[in-house]
Image (cartoon, rainbow, N blue to C red):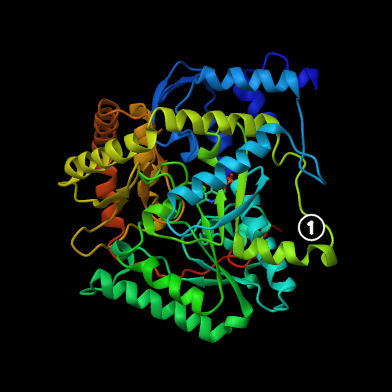
Amino acid sequence: MTDQIQNKSLKEIDQLFHMHGNTSISMLNATGPTIMDSAQGMRITDTDGNEYLDSIAGLWCMTLGYGRNEIGDVAKEIIGKLGFGHTFGNSTCESTTLLAQKLVTMFNSTVPGASISKVFFGNSGSDANDTNVKLMRLYNNLRGKPSKKKVISRTGAYHGLTTLATALTGIPAYHKAFDAPVEQVVRLSTPSYYRFHSDGETEAQFTDRLISELKDAIAREGADNIGAFIAEPVMGTGGMFVPPVGYFEKVQPILEENDILLIVDEVVTGFGRTGKMFGCETFGLKPDFVTLAKGLTSAYAPLSASLISSRVWDVLQNASEEYGPIMHGFTYGGHPLSTTIALKAIEILERESLVDNAAEVGPYLIRKMQEATADCPYVGEVRGIGAMLGVEYVADKATRRPFDPKLGAHKLVAAECAKAGLISRALPYIEVTNMAPPLIITKQDADECVELYIRALNAAMPKLAEMARQSETQAMSEASPAFPNSLNGCRTLA
Ligand SMILES: Cc1ncc(COP(=O)(O)O)c(C=O)c1O
């Protein structure tokens, strides 16, 4: 082992020992890693001395910006004082209990009609979505409705990558050869008006088509077999899809009529991203479960929270004596380090009015990006809400004809952005560049984002023109692409 690492650079050691997340092994072997070294505010420096403006806040999560020493101080203190604590049985610690109280109070006081009763802590957005589905199943078993278990999800949705969360995720790339338990999921179309409306169809008509599809799916599966509908208020990783007009207003009564619980996945939208504290407030949602992570600690420590409504909690509580303990929990769920950091992160978010800043500077960034790209023949739409935006590329603007997905038009732009010193993200479902900056972003930072992005787009133009020519026969993507769940369609190794 020592021989293997002697005289090796950190990059070489990384290639020898480290499996990265969501990465092509062959690509990483060819390019080597980028090793981030230090960061402050919205800026990151790598070990080669390159500086980047981080327009996606890490992975939509670094809401308070990098380098918050105040958070380091409370982290050091709690590690010295307690170090570890769990929530099994009757055990808890001060910060975990106070965070539960804070989240219930915050949510119920900001989201009209919300009735959250309890909080369960986990470690990631994925495991919190798994928790919510498990609790939905328990709820229906306890109510004597054992068949009511499937979950409705939308194509293009991202709900994480544990086994169950992968099945809920509606992006084919994440399914390839993983055999996720997709039979537990009822899949609906992507609610993206720009991408998927038919010629001449208004936004309201598009919404009605989605609503008919929902009603048909419930009729086909039987309401007695469907336990929940899971939705991100704004679909982030799928392509920054803001729901079409009237969508959630029409979805919610149908769920209510059919006794289907609503799981709102606020992993991205929670804590200010849409310009309000929660996406449920932005879109008038009344959830039975809420999934929180990312902005909960501003990513200074891993933590997720499942918020559980009174309607669900009452059933669990009333059955408790007969049912016995709910055997679900994680060693690190509610870790005092994470919950201490979450309390501090929320305090800073409120103290610095960062949600108001997101509501002001986010739309400014979106508008500036729209103006700067208006003449580009390959930018079909710049859309967003609050401090989250997407740039969708098309091979032909007049017909919305997409690029051939194999060409990776958006990946080309992201690579040029990195060269220009801007971290953006090429999303994995359709050709979209994503920005979701830390909520501390100023108008000056936003102008710099636009300037660097346009530099990158200009550098990509000759290749985009070539890709557009190669995509001449490309048809509009199907609304419901196949999920390559098994090795079908993959090259099998001899
Ligand atoms: C909406 C949404 N849900 C769930 C997740 C999964 O969170 P994690 O990566 O912490 O498991 C993500 C991650 O990006 C997300 O965007």
SS type, badge 1: loop
Q: Is residue 388 visible?
A: yes
Q: Is residue 146 above or below residue 334?
A: below
Label 1: how many Cα within 10 Å (few below 14, some 14–19, many 20+): few
Q: Residue furthest top?
A: 7
Say what amino acid the circle numbered 1 marks: Ile
Q: Write down the quadrant of residue 212 in the picture.
A: bottom left
The image quadrant of residue 363 is: top left
* Quadrant including the C terminus: bottom right
**Residue nearest the observer in this picture, 135 or 28:** 135
For the point 50% across and 74% down, the residue is 256
Please indicate, yes or no, whether residue 490 appears anywhere in the rendered image. no
Q: Position of residue 168 (x, y in %)?
A: 58, 62
Q: Is residue 308 left or right of residue 283?
A: right
Which percent across, then down, holds residue 161? 61, 52
Q: Is mark 1 within 8 Å of ligand 1?
A: no
Q: Quadrant of the N terminus?
A: top right
Quarter of the view holding residue 421: top left
Q: How many marks?
A: 1
Q: Position of residue 450 (x, y in %)?
A: 26, 34
List x then y, in percent, for residue 349: 45, 32
Residue 188, compared with residue 104, is above or below; it is: below
Nearest the viewer among 302 and 115 is 115
| 318 horizontally vs 70: left or right | right
Image vertical order of residue 108 relative to residue 10, above or below: below
Q: Which residue is mark 1?
A: 326
Judged from this view, the residue extending furthest toward the left is: 375
321 vs 92: above or below: below
Residue at image coords 50%, 34%: 346
* Residue drawn where x is 64% and y is 71% of the image: 184
What residue is drawn where x is 68% and y is 62%?
135
